[in-house]
Amino acid sequence: MFRRIDLENFRSFTKATLDLGGKGGTAKPYALIYGENGSGKTNLIESVSFLTQSMRTLVIGDDIARQRAILKNLRDVEDGSSILSQSMDLMDRAFEEIEMAASSISICDYARTVKTIGSDTDMRLVYSFIVDGKEAEYELRFSDDGKVVHERLNYFINSRSGRYFEIDGRNGPATILFGNGLFTNRRFKAQMKELVEKFWGNHTFMSILYAEYRRSNREYIEENVRQGMGMIISYLDDIVVSTPLDGRDPRVWPFEPISGTIPSESEHLLDAYEEAIDTFFTRMYTDVGKTYYKKAEKDGNIAYMLMFSKRISGTFREVPATMESTGTRKLLSMMPALLSCVDGSVVFVDELDSGIHDKLIHDLMKEVLPSVKGQMVVTTHNTSLIKDTDPSKVYVIDLDAVGNKDIRSVDAVTRTQKSHNNTARYLEGMFGGVPYIGMMDLKDISDTLGEKLGRDP
């Protein structure tokens, strides 16, 4: 669970801190983050996405190979039938994933993209999180050209906090410091130093280690690397980030949820998710009688398409998920994240309520938040949630007159009582983070535009 995120020169944050710390060194199980449009809510969630992607740059080639295999299967089974033809839409999405992955093989391009425009100092990100009941702190620093110039991890060694590793390239060739006991084998330690000298700067050391964990024999790694390092990598690998711009996360949803093709031996996965989706949507939508996958099998593969059986004018009609509303598809894409956080994972969700009815989100969160066993951090504009949520778990991004940003929980902004209606207080501006519209004459804007375009008055 995250206790704190410090950002310097990341997107719209020149310097900001999200403090999720609870009492006694714990972390809050959930947080709702508010702010006016453009305040940086999406940037905040992206800082966690940046962390997880920075760890995977050396294994992207492996993921591309898997995507190419999926495409080959799709081409092999396509025969013109309706389901198979529609499932070929997956090809386009897979190609997009491949293209995005290929452009992100080095972290440098991404780091240059997210560094604050016009900033003249390094981009710095520090993440503090709890693993196995103990706090870890991971720091990354990037130069203007997107290179990693400093990387550090602190965690517990022999019952006290200590340095696991620190690599510093700010003043010339990188200095490499590995903490005592991080590696139990001298040869393995020497191999890691060689990999740092080869890859570090374009890739983080965490990505180098992660690639070793992905590609090598697990027993071999466990014999040569301190157990705590493996727990940290596993923790970071399990983080789920859900944004409107993200595609499917294969770690939490092993196939395309709406349509696609899977090997016949994986049909049990399709059936298991079908049951979960059916339970989810029939509880939330009064007009949905059933959700199911329409399937067609050929040559050892199953082409599938998600269908909604909906009551329309007194008759149940079969509606493909591709024809469903933006809100329904948003709920479907968000469903794995919701299940993950109640199953013990750390989940960050951007624009929780995008396209979804206020009351539906309110009622859904009343069910989800008390059940969180991991951690759930969401951005939202649904103000009805504020009234029923602990003020210490409601955060507001506020901007001052010159654009500096402050992220604070409601109880840190001002004193609150149980009798207070914090929704109303937020909308009145007591906590900051609400939009203020200046005087606007739309007719005048329209007339001026028409004049510039040469239109007759």
Image: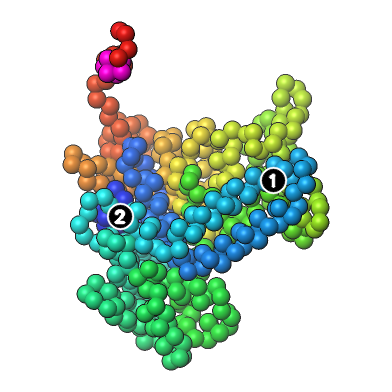
Could you tell me residue 367's position as x and y percent?
A: 55, 44
Relative to 350, is 112 above or below? below
Q: CA distance from mark 1 to mark 2?
A: 38 Å
Q: Secondary structure at mark 1?
A: helix
Relative to 115, is 437 above or below? above
Q: Which residue is painted at 56% across and 79% down in the image?
A: 216
Q: Which residue is painted at 52% across and 59% down in the image?
A: 345
Residue 335 visible in the displayed image: no
Please give the label number shown on residue 300.
Answer: none
Picture quarter with the N terminus:
bottom left
Q: Which residue is mark 2?
A: 115
Relative to 122, is 316 above or below? above
Mark 1 residue type = Ser
Q: Secondary structure at mark 2?
A: loop
Secondary structure that dominates the magenta span: helix
Q: Which residue is painted at 77% across and 61% down in the image?
A: 265
Residue 82 visible in the displayed image: yes
- Which of the pair 329/433 is nearer the observer? 329
Could you tell me residue 426's position as x and y percent?
A: 33, 35
Could you tell me residue 24's position as x and y percent?
A: 36, 64
Judge from the rendering whether residue 55 lies leftward or rightward of residue 146; answer left or right: right
The outermost residue toward the front is 454
Please give the label number shown on residue 87.
Answer: 1
- Which of the pair 338/256 is nearer the observer? 256
Judge from the rendering whether residue 435 lies leftward or rightward of residue 258; answer left or right: left
Mark 2 residue type = Lys
Q: Which residues are magenta?
A: 448-453
Tell me if residue 452 is in the magenta stretch. Answer: yes
- Which of the pair 253/432 is nearer the observer? 253
Label 1 crowding class (10 Å Cα cut-off): few <14, some 14-19, many 20+? many
State the image quarter where residue 382 is shown: top left
Label 2 crowding class (10 Å Cα cut-off): few <14, some 14-19, many 20+? many
